[in-house]
Amino acid sequence: MKTVISVPLPDHPYNVVVAAQGLDHVGTWLADPGSPLVKPGQKLLVVSNPAIFKHYGDRLVASLTQAGYTVQTCLLPAGERYKTLTSIQKIYDAALAFHLERKSAMVALGGGVIGDMTGFAAATWLRGLSVVQVPTSLLAMVDASIGGKTGVNHPQGKNLIGAFHQPRLVMIDPIVLKTLPAREFRAGMAEVIKYGVIWDQDLFQALEAAPRLDQYRYVGEELLHAILTRSCQAKADVVSQDEKEAGLRAILNYGHTIGHAVESLMHYKGVNHGEAVAIGMVAAGKIATARGYWTEKEAQRQRSLIEKTGLPTEIPSQLAPEAILTLLQGDKKVEDGQVRFVMPQGLGSAFVTSDITRQDVLAALG
């Protein structure tokens, strides 16, 4: 199966291609004779990590070289704790050594960390190079690779350093998920559940109907294709209406406000991004119930789906709710000193509010 999803931004339109074995055709898509996204003959810097490159690097490089590109690679350590300016410097060093030019491009082969860092390096090297996203984790496929958010972490908070830089192409090959660790698959499912809550009630119901969601092998090909395409379509719908998060796009942060605080306080160890988002969604669901934005039944349906996926629902025992509140004040979503929260408004709809109090948060975290 192959599905092409358009992200129709006025200045930076691009396609998200979901296709089995698509990894072997990235070069063909880029070098499209009718309208090449990057002209053949140009230099491409592939950024990845050693584990991912060992599995898929040769196939991607072969696809690009066969299409007429000159390819060099830059391998970075895996993990959120390496999502720093030090890693960006390594990409810059590789770009300099490879003599990248303004018509060159960078290609991200990996999960969300690699995609974010490659996108940020491309946005800032020579004042902006093209970037191609080839995500290899479920989380990156349904979220991080689409929408142009790029960046790295600051010691005081997640993704505080960054830029908007849209890709020229996103190529999603579901087959690569076979080598994704089960825990990382579950982490990606947190973002999928998010889309079901804030945008696509039919997706939420399809997930509820699935017998198991905690491992790739239990999700059939048809459901997996629906998970990928419906999630990507939801992201494309929102981003095309609000590219730089002036309004609507903020709903994509559902579960992320508290989730980012949990990640930071855990120093990006012991809790991964998807697990933190799951915790944040449950907390937001509790607040929404207390405020009357949705029903106790809807909150329980969300919690049950998260539990079925094998994701956590409570903050780690070593974290104090007051510490989370303190960190929230430094979140990039703070506006006029007030933390903005995304609240569900029934299944399939959400809104942003600055009216959530300290007491609301403490009650939800308790």
Image: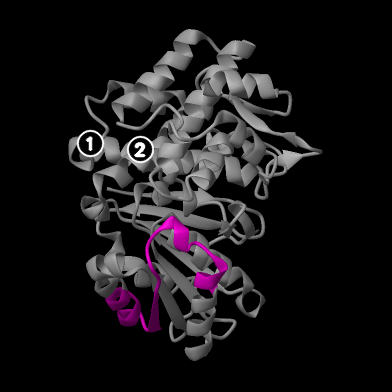
Residue at image location 56% in from the left, 81% down from the top: 103
Residue sitting farthest toward the left: 217
For residue 69, say whether it is visible. no
Q: Position of residue 302 (x, y in %)?
A: 42, 21
Would you name the residue on which mark 1 appears? Answer: 219
Label 2 Cα crowd, 10 Å radius (few <14 / some 14-19 / many 20+)? many
Quarter of the figure with residue 154 = bottom right
* Residue 227 tag number: 2
Q: Is residue 86 one of those drawn in magenta? A: yes
What amino acid type is highlighted by mark number 1?
A: Val
Quarter of the figure with residue 284 = top right
CB atoms at circles 1 and 2 under 8 Å apart?
Answer: yes
Against 45, is 350 above or below?
above
Relative to residue 157, is residue 329 drawn left or right?
right
Chain part drawn in magenta: 61-88
Against 273, is 121 above or below?
below
* Residue 154 tag number: none
Against 266, is 309 above or below?
above
Alpha-carbon span between mark 1 and mark 2:
10 Å
Relative to residue 118, is residue 230 drawn left or right?
left
Q: Position of residue 160 (x, y in %)?
A: 64, 54
Q: Could you say which is closer to the camera, residue 4 or residue 256?
A: 256
Q: Is residue 146 one of those drawn in magenta? A: no
For residue 355, say whether it is visible. yes
